[in-house]
Amino acid sequence: MKETLSRSLIWLDARLAPLARHLPEALKAPLRRLARGAPAPVHAIDAAAADADATVDQAASAPVEPAPDERSPAEPAAAETGAAPPTDEYAERLRREQEIFADQIDINALPRIFHYWSHTYLRPKLEEFGCANPDEFFADALQAAAREAGVSPARFVSLGAGNCDTEVRVAQILVARGFTDFTLECVDINPVMLERGAALARESGLAAQVLPIAGDFNDWRPARRYDAVMANQSLHHVMNLEGLFDAIAANLPPHGRFVISDMIGRNGHLRWPEALAPVREFWAELPARYRHHRQLGQQWDEFVDFDCSGEGFEGIRAQDILPLLIERFGFERFLGFANVIDPFIDRGFGGHFDADSAHDLALIDRIHACDEAGMLDGRWKPTHAMAVMRKAAYAGPTQVWRHLTPAHCLRVPS
């Protein structure tokens, strides 16, 4: 009974706290007085964490009063900036977002043709950065930040962690390298996904390191100083990007890293006009059976430039991510990639392509060659990016692929 009540309070806190900030001041004031007189809410949802080390459990389970040292968080007002969405619209989008993702046990499941493309064309780019896959890209940045911090335990946080599967894999890489003295808090607003993440962490023997925590990144205020912040395919779900980026920038120590892998194309994952034309040219080559959208159950004889942001938060402000990052951070590493190829290898249509068919592989190769040529000569911009960022004052080198710097990859709406 006690555990059920606790989980119910956590569920309510994760949803109502972000919305309360939009109430009229006349209602906010008495709520503040009530909150100050009440115990601090517990945010960690994994009841099994009580079996872990007491210090780790305390750090995972409750807001921590900042210590007056380098790890103390910056002023909390930093997270207040940025335009917040109206309460009614936000609440409805939040409901749909939770509904959409509640049953997605493997949100990273992609068709075989995607893996052919990524292994053939994306992996060689990553190898120039010294890693073989995105998980290693994250692990390298977290480990570099911890090494420069020189303080234990290292503290990391992942925003929009979902099922925490990427975070568990990153933690496994770090542990395999002999680096075990760290915690990786996994913040997400979906309690069902966090439950799966907690179970995965336990099954992987990482319950002491990977700590699922209920929270909303649209209203995130760091409770402590983190050595690194990561966001994997979550930023394109954020409405209050300014507030989130300001909170991260204010909290990031000089040795800190903000590492991301995300989508930076047009809002709702629409194609910009310059990329829509080649997509439709290649679309005309597809057999009719390849033009059936598997997720929507629709036949697209002509390519439909579909806006994914209509209900939940999918791609809600994707085109604002890169310019806001450029304004607030310095880049240590940046890899921009993929645009025209997207519809042909993603979940909607990629499953129609036969990864064992020479004909299908040749078509994917041609689309990729066209796509990459267009990005390199600037006709269109990448819609995906992986980046390691530092504080804005960072004056070190920036590693990029070819000449695709963050500025070069910026697509300014006309």
Image (spheres, grey):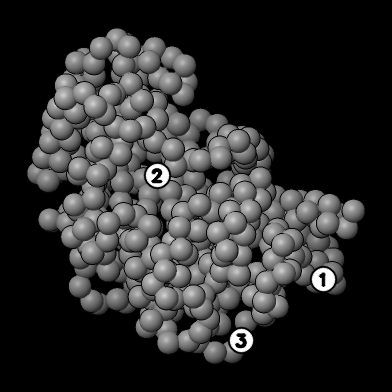
Q: Secondary structure at mark 2?
A: helix
First along the sequence among labels 1 and 3: 1
86 to 77, vertically: above or below: above
Q: Point out residue 222 in the picture as x, y percentages from the top left corner.
A: 57, 69
Residue underneath mark 1: 39
| Residue located at (88% from left, 58% from top) | 2
Under circle 1, the secondary element is loop
Residue nearer the viewer, 115 or 43 = 115
Q: Give whichever of 365, 300 is nearer the camera.
A: 365
Q: Which mark is residue 318?
A: 2
- Of marks 2 and 1, the one in the foreground: 1
Q: Where in the figure is residue 26, as x and y percent of width and height? A: 79, 57
Q: Residue at x 47, y 16 (%)?
A: 297
The part of the image, by quadrant, that contains residue 36 is bottom right
Vertical comparison of 155 with 214: above or below: below
Point out residue 19 in the picture as x, y percentages from the top left corner.
68, 50
Q: Is residue 272 visible?
A: no
* Viewer-side label of 2, 3: 3
